[in-house]
Image (cartoon, coloured by chain):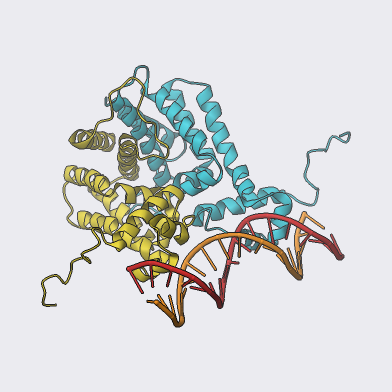
Chain colours: A cyan, B yellow, C orange, D red
Amino acid sequence: MASGMEHSRPAHDAVGTKERIQQVALELFVLHGYEKTSLREIADRLGITKAALYYHYASKQELLKSITQPLIDEFEVLVASAPDRDTLLRSYVDVLSRHQAVFQLVANDHASLAAAELVERSVKLRRDIVRQLAGPRPRPVDYVLASAAFGAIAQGFAVARRVEPQADPAPPGSAGYPEGEELTELLVATALRVLEQG
Amino acid sequence: MASGMEHSRPAHDAVGTKERIQQVALELFVLHGYEKTSLREIADRLGITKAALYYHYASKQELLKSITQPLIDEFEVLVASAPDRDTLLRSYVDVLSRHQAVFQLVANDHASLAAAELVERSVKLRRDIVRQLAGPRPRPVDYVLASAAFGAIAQGFAVARRVEPQADPAPPGSAGYPEGEELTELLVATALRVLEQG
DNA sequence: GTCTATATACAGATAGAC
DNA sequence: GTCTATCTGTATATAGAC
């Protein structure tokens, strides 16, 4: 409390063990799913034992929660700020980029969402986001279009970032997918086109 | 071989036990995920024992395969017929409608796709469909848009059919979501708009 | 902070009676 | 076609030494 180093890592460990566990666990969860991934597998990959994992995380579920929390937290902050439609879409792509792997996990493995006790929060999130997108006094069709817009962004993003399972190395006879600002603009423009179809 | 009833069910059972097992299993797989659902749970819900399940299916995996096969088969037939873009999209929505629950399973639980050994086939399917959508000599951006179009259909459909986990009963102050032909037209039109954005 | 050893639970699957 | 009983494997999790 007095040295000014209270929050630093043990000097001999560049990246904390806790963080390394999260990285490896996330990788395996995405690859094989949360339920199918065992703590033994995670421990082996790290060169430690199962028991050691329990020193850092109280349970497999707590490990999962620590991994998924940041994404859902950030989404909730974003939605609470209630930005205009354009900013919301752009920020959505931005969050997707920065939490790519975690998004991939919860999007493709609903069992992990349930295990992390995030189903309620994520349902509420999606509902709030769709509401902000659909605008004031939305018709039912506006809800469908708002969801379609989100699906378009997520899927387009997944392909462009080759985030899909066993994605192709590259499309034949082409340079490469758009990325960065270019990709963001493309996806946002696509979403807007979908929304304005009503 | 001679009575003319060779392929009929035992007379005392309106719907065959095999089919009832599939129905219950699918329901639970969608709800809790394939890995998390135990054979005991399925058997209990049916009022039989685990051992009885093994009379009808050689393994949990075989049960899963028998459930997922029809969807992937139908998709492959559709793609092999190589219809025009409009017909392809319309048929896609049609397949989605008729195999709603199975689609929901494989879309939200990649672990089940893997367990059913359908990853390769479904990756190839998606690639072929996207190619047919992207048209001749597609640029990378066309691939992204084609995938976005699919994402839009799948997500729009999910909301309209209230297929999402814990979906809302109905949007506030509205009659209801589009359905049937109306829904198909909406989703196909949306997909086309996305594709023509390039 | 990591280890060995172990407790406990439940999964998928099989044998054989009825 | 369904049952009881059981085998075998592996999972999460804990106790206690180092």
Residue A191 in percent (x, y) is at 36, 31
Q: In front: A98, or D8?
A: D8
Is residue B105 visible to the viewer in this orientation of the structure?
yes
Is residue B119 depicted above or below B168 in this figure?
A: below
Q: Could you tell me residue A94's position as x and y percent?
A: 50, 34
The image quarter containing residue B177 is top left
Residue in view at x 48 percent, y 21 percent: A83
Residue A10 drawn above or below residue B11: above
Nearer the observer, A126 or A99: A126
**Residue A165 visible, this angle:** no
Position above or below: A110 against A90: below
Q: In the rendered view, tell whether residue C15 sits above or below residue B143.
A: below
User: Foreground: B99 or A29?
Assistant: B99
Task: Give the residue furthest to the top.
Answer: A136
**Left/right of residue B165 with respect to residue A34 in the rendered view:** left
Placement of the C terminus of chain A among the 4 image quadrants: top left
Count numbered badges in the picture: 0
Q: Quadrant of the N terminus of chain A?
A: top right
Residue drawn at the location 34% of the way across and 59% of the way down:
B21
Q: Position of residue A192 (x, y in %)?
A: 35, 27
**In the rendering, at what x and y percent does residue B130 appear?**
29, 48
